[in-house]
Image (tube, rainbow, N blue to C red):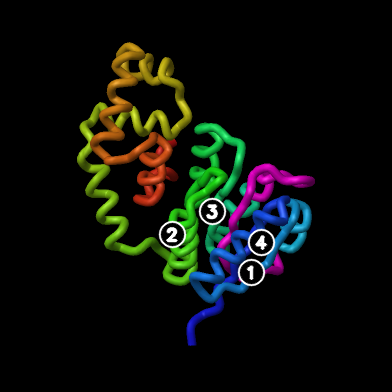
């Protein structure tokens, strides 16, 4: 018998919660529980079965940041996918560094959300990412030239182009060109996609 998979949706929009429940239950056997705000979720957190959390950062009461902080201390029991409507790159990086598996913007596409949730349950059930997936991503990251890898590391740390330029002793134009080369080398559509790859390969926690 397969293990029960518990999915927790934390979002203050009922229609969004219902949409996610309908989506995931059409693609797998999930036991879903909904939370309309951060306070009720945090109050229930320690009594919940291990599972995957789909978290909006804009919540009533205790905000999504508080929920993310609590979840980051419990990655042995919970894995988190952030789905939110209002954010910037710094917010996304902070969430990924805090342990979020992925950071998706509303309106999200179905497949990335399902893939992220599946990764979350794989981590909970096996303690690691699929080995073949990690190896494939690391192979892509190893294609980066040293200067490209240095820029990606500093972007992950949240540094601006100007700060990166000073750190590497290059001008802002060179930083922009290196950033573009990173996306080409990794075949990533955006810098957030490149940072997702670094997270999947287990690199984010070591880049301090």
Residue 30 versus residue 13: which sits nearer the camera?
Answer: 13
Q: Position of residue 99 (x, y in %)?
A: 51, 50
For disc 2, the neighbor class at 10 Å (few under 14, some 14 to 19, many from 20) is few
Q: How many marks?
A: 4
Q: Nearer the viewer, mark 2 or mark 4?
A: 4
Residue that appears at 58% across and 35% down: 87
Lower sequence index among marks 1 and 4: 4
The numbered dot on residue 32 is 1
Lower sequence index among marks 2 and 3: 3
Quarter of the image with the C terminus is: top left
Lower sequence index among marks 2 and 1: 1
Magenta highlight on residue 57: yes
Q: Secondary structure at mark 1?
A: strand
The numbered dot on residue 18 is 4
The residue that mark 3 highlights is: 81
Mark 4–mark 3 Cα distance, whole angstroms, equals: 16 Å
Residue that appears at 61% across and 37% down: 86
For disc 4, the neighbor class at 10 Å (few under 14, some 14 to 19, many from 20) is few
Q: Secondary structure at mark 3?
A: strand
Mark 2–mark 4 Cα distance, whole angstroms, equals: 19 Å
Residue range (magenta): 45-67
Q: Is residue 6 above or below residue 157?
A: below
The residue that mark 2 highlights is: 115
Mark 1–mark 3 Cα distance, whole angstroms, equals: 15 Å
């Amino acid at each position: 018998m397969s293990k029960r998979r518990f999915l927790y949706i934390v979002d203050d929009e009922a229609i969004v919660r219902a949409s996610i429940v309908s989506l995931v239950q059409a693609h797998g056997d999930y036991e879903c529980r909904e939370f309309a705000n951060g306070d009720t979720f945090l109050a229930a957190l320690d009594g919940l079965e291990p599972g995957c959390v789909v978290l909006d950062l804009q919540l009533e009461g205790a905000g999504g940041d508080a929920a993310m902080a609590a979840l980051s201390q419990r990655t042995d029991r919970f894995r988190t996918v952030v789905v939110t409507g209002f954010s910037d790159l710094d917010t996304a990086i902070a969430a990924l560094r805090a342990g979020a598996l992925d950071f998706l913007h509303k309106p999200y596409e179905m497949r990335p959300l399902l893939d992220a949730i599946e990764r979350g349950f794989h981590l909970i059930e096996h303690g690691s990412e699929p080995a073949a997936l990690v190896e494939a991503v690391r192979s892509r990251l190893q294609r980066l030239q040293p200067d490209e890898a240095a820029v990606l590391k500093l972007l992950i740390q949240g540094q601006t182009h100007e700060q990166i330029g000073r750190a590497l002793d290059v001008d802002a134009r060179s930083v922009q060109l290196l950033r573009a080369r990173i996306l080409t080398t990794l075949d990533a559509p955006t810098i957030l996609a490149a940072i997702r790859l670094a997270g999947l390969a287990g690199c984010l926690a070591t880049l301090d």
